[in-house]
């Protein structure tokens, strides 16, 4: 996929799988050599790489921004592939909208990064569109001008190409995909544009090689069996694409981007923000009224939320109070139990102390008695000795 921003500035955007020939076609289209980095098939997500160039041919200056979709379709999750593209396009619209909503707008020198054309590269399978192609184009068709191209069209035979084109268009129609239609209301271009609408999608060939044909060097791809000339209309639709994109319809692409795609984005975004042109009774509503209504709604919402928060706070405080009371009750219970244990322990100890004191008293009494008893035999011996002494002295 490739997006072009045109402008005297043009922004193309090109989604298409890795290696499908996007960079080569861009180089061939603008006859230059843009910075190209070969992409890996293992990008974890799609990246959009924008590069801006100032091109000049004769007196025409062209500011071209090319947005390449790197790693498109290489992810397991296919939504990943297109969502980044959708987001990228929306972001450019959003920047423009923000500029438009500024009090001091400078849209005349604003760097418009909106995507004006999306070259959607279809693989030359000759079979049918991949589901990713259909889903992606469906997601993008209300946001950007899609120009489908069959890449590497030299790899498919003429009759197969014819059938493939018909198949692609019928699949697009039956899936409700709206591709860009070259405008036919302007008489000067209606004939060519009608004819070109009939040969979509363009079958393109790109090449960085030049081959000598007659006495002229031309962009071509050389094969053992012959030469495919990029700019030969019998060989492919490259010239038609270039004419349609850069010469005939550049202005229309820019206009459609602004009046159709951007307008839709703007409308949805403003409606989402609550702006409306009429009230439910289909009466016009001024910006001031919308502002007042929104302000009122906002204040009401704020009050409601404040009340909710207040109630939530009261509820939380109540819960906390109950929790604390419960904890206090538990603590009190534990305290009472400890007190009981303590007094039981104390009375046991008192009991023990009393019995010990009794024992000590008994012991002391016994000790005194024992001491008394011990004192008596000692006196008897002394008396015996006295008697003995008396006998010996003859006082008996
Ligand atoms: P990534 O940026 O890596 O995703 O690749 P790409 O889509 O930019 O493809 P690129 O232009 O680098 O081309 C990949 C290969 O395809 C190169 O070998 C090109 O020479 C070849 N190629 C490019 N255009 C054509 C074409 O129209 N026909 C044929 N047969 N081969 C082409
Ligand atoms: Mg490339």
Image (cartoon, grey):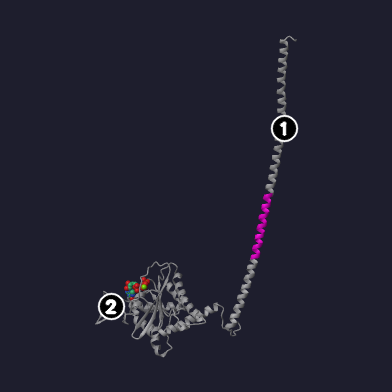
Is residue 369 among the parts visible in the rendering?
yes
Q: Quadrant of the C terminus?
A: top right
Quadrant assignment for the N terminus: bottom left
Q: How would you classify the magenta stretch by its main secondary structure?
A: helix
Q: Position of residue 145 (x, y in %)?
A: 43, 80
Residue 61: image x %, image y %?
A: 37, 84
> Callout 2: few (<14), some (14-19), or many (20+) C-alpha neighbours within 10 Å?
some
Assign a secondary structure to mark 2.
strand
Residue at image location 72% in from the left, 10% down from the top = 391
- Front residue (pair 175, 285): 285
Task: Identify the residue under disc 1.
Answer: 361
Q: Indicate which disc residue 210 carries.
A: 2
Locate residue 21: give its quadrant.
bottom left
Query: Is 72 above or below relative to 233?
Result: above
Which quadrant holds residue 387? top right
Residue 121 screen position, x and y as percent: 39, 75
What are the residue bounds of the magenta stretch?
A: 313-335
3D distance between C-alphas at marks 1 and 2: 130 Å
Q: Is residue 152 visible?
A: no
In the figure, is residue 148 to the left or right of 355?
left
Q: Are marks 1 and 2 in contact (CB under 8 Å)?
A: no
Residue 133 quadrant: bottom left
């Amino acid at each position: 996929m490739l997006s072009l921003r045109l402008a005297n500035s043009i922004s193309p955007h090109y989604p298409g799988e890795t290696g499908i020939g996007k960079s080569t076609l861009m180089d061939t289209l603008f006859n230059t050599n843009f910075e190209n980095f070969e992409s890996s098939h293992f990008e974890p997500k799609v990246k959009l790489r924008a590069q801006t160039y100032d091109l000049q041919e004769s007196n025409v200056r062209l500011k071209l921004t090319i947005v390449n979709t790197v790693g498109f379709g290489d992810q397991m999750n296919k939504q990943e592939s297109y969502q980044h593209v959708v987001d990228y396009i929306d972001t450019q619209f959003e920047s423009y909208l923000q500029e438009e909503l500024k009090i001091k707008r400078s849209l005349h020198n604003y760097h418009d990064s909106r995507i004006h054309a999306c070259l959607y590269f279809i693989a030359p399978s000759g079979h049918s569109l991949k589901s990713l192609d259909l889903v992606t184009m469906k997601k993008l068709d209300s946001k950007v001008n899609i120009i489908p191209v069959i890449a590497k069209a030299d790899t498919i035979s003429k009759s197969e190409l014819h059938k493939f084109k018909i198949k692609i268009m019928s699949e697009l129609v039956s899936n409700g995909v709206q591709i860009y239609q070259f405008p036919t209301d302007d008489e000067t271009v209606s004939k060519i544009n009608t004819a070109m609408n009939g040969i979509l999608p363009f079958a393109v060939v790109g090449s960085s090689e030049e081959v000598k044909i007659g006495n002229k060097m031309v962009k071509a791809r050389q094969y053992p069996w012959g030469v495919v000339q990029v700019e030969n209309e019998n060989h492919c639709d490259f010239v038609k694409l270039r004419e349609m994109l850069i010469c005939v319809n550049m202005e229309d692409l820019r206009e459609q981007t602004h009046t159709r795609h951007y307008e839709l984005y703007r409308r949805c975004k403003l409606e989402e923000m609550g702006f409306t042109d009429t009230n439910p009774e289909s009466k016009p509503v001024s910006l001031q009224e919308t502002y007042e209504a929104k302000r009122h709604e906002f204040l009401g919402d704020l009050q409601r939320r404040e009340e909710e928060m207040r109630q939530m706070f009261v509820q939380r405080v109540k819960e906390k109070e109950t929790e604390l009371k419960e904890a206090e009750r538990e603590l009190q219970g534990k305290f009472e139990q400890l007190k009981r244990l303590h007094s039981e322990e104390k009375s046991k100890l008192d009991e023990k102390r009393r019995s010990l004191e009794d024992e000590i008293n008994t012991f002391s009494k016994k000790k005194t008695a024992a001491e008394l008893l011990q004192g008596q035999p000692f006196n008897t011996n002394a008396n015996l000795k006295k008697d003995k002494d008396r006998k010996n002295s003859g006082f008996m």
